[in-house]
Image (cartoon, rainbow, N blue to C red):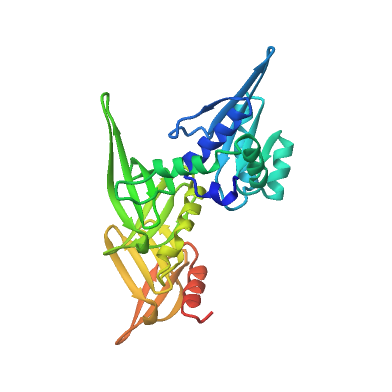
């Protein structure tokens, strides 16, 4: 029998493959798109009976949280762009109320987790265990670690795959030439070194500390899905230090955790331990009198550190909260 937990344990690519297989069993002609395609389409399905032809686009979302109106609207626009009869969004979770309304407005068919398992148990009743085992067996590294997430990303202009296991995050680079395809693991990050992550409009920032604090700026194809996969091994990196606030600014990155404040700029890192912070103040400087953040570091004497931040009040409140003085 198919169950939601079983589907959530599949890597995203295998979940897309399963959804395509389901529609194939239902009598549709199916075509899965390339993983590297950025058009937002996972699967194309069509059926042609007695000259009546229908073509739909299918988006498969292996999520644990609900799918919102923004994503429904984004995928719904594909029906107009691709000139098809409609769009189907299949998820392991559910849709928000606004998402359902948006779907009804634009003829978007929404398939939630309970209905999906019901369809799988009807059309593929004896394939659950074998498909899951096959999917797991395909995605295992030579180290013996089982992969539960594989995501297309770009870092410093290089296209890579982020490969997630319960212990590590691997950076995998694939080089394709006319006669060969080379797969290379170029970096490994221990899960225990991950402090937290911050999603911006176009980038995902991961704060880590192996030998030295570092911020990785990644462009991930599906940042929400990647963030959800990180949560699957979150217990591995809950080591006491957690990210409280993050900001990318011209000179570098400002990072606040429950242990320290860091100003990171091109390999140079200024660290102030929270236990050495006597207070945080708002200071006006310059002709425009823009608010700046002043951190008072207390050791043998008081040292005043000034930082140009987007919202000095918010940073001050976050620091006081970290000190337990809110």
The N terminus lies in which quarter of the figure?
top right
The answer to whether residue 109 of the structure is visible from this angle is: yes
Q: Is residue 102 left or right of residue 298?
A: right
Q: Quadrant of residue 91?
A: top right
Which residue is at a point 38% across and 56% down the rendered structure image?
Answer: 250
Residue 134 rendering spot, x and y as whole percentages:
45, 40
Q: Which residue lies at the image location 57% right of the left edge and 38% below the top edge?
A: 126
Quarter-of-image position of residue 269: bottom left
Q: Nearer the viewer, residue 95 or 82?
A: 95
Q: Position of residue 296 (x, y in %)?
A: 39, 79
**Residue most toward the front?**
126
- Above or below: residue 192 compared with residue 42: below
Residue at the location (64% across, 21% down)?
Answer: 47
Question: In the figure, is residue 35 to the left or right of 303?
Answer: right
Q: Position of residue 303 (x, y in %)?
A: 33, 80
Left or right of residue 92: residue 103: right
Mark yes or no: residue 308 visible.
no
Extreme top residue here? 51
Relative to the observer, which residue lies in front, 183 or 107?
Answer: 183
Q: Position of residue 45 (x, y in %)?
A: 59, 26
Image quarter where the C terminus lies is bottom right
Residue found at x 38% / y 81% = 275
Image mark count: 0
Where on the picture, by quarter, is residue 103? top right
Answer left or right for 86 relative to 64: right
């Amino acid at each position: 029998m198919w169950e939601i937990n079983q589907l959530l344990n599949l890597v995203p690519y295998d979940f897309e493959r399963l959804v395509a297989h389901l529609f194939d069993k239902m009598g549709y002609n199916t075509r899965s798109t390339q993983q590297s395609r950025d058009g937002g389409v996972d699967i194309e399905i069509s059926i042609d009976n007695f000259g009546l032809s229908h073509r739909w686009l299918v988006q498969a979302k292996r999520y644990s949280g609900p799918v919102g109106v923004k994503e429904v609207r984004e995928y719904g626009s594909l029906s107009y762009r691709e000139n098809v009869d409609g769009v189907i969004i299949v998820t392991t979770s559910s849709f928000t109320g606004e998402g359902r309304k948006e779907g009804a407005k634009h003829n978007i068919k929404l398939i939630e987790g309970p209905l999906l398992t019901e369809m799988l148990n009807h059309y593929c009743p004896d394939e659950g265990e074998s498909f899951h085992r096959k999917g797991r067996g395909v995605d295992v590294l030579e180290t013996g670690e089982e992969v539960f997430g594989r995501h297309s990303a770009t870092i410093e202009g290089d296209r890579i795959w982020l490969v997630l296991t319960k212990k590590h995050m691997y950076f995998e680079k694939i080089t394709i030439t006319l006669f060969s395809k080379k797969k290379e693991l170029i970096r490994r990050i221990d899960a225990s070194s991950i402090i937290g992550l911050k999603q911006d409009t176009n980038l995902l920032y991961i704060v880590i500390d192996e030998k030295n604090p570092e911020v990785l700026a990644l462009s991930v194809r599906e940042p929400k899905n990647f963030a959800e996969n990180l949560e699957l091994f979150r217990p591995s990196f809950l080591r006491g230090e957690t990210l409280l606030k993050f900001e990318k600014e011209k000179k570098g990155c400002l990072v606040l955790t429950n242990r320290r404040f860091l100003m990171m700029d091109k390999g140079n890192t200024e660290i102030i331990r929270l236990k050495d912070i006597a207070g945080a103040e708002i200071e006006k400087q310059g002709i425009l009198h823009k608010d700046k953040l002043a951190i008072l570091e207390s050791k043998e004497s008081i040292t005043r550190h000034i930082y140009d931040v987007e919202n000095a009040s918010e940073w001050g409140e976050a620091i006081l909260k970290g000190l337990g003085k809110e």
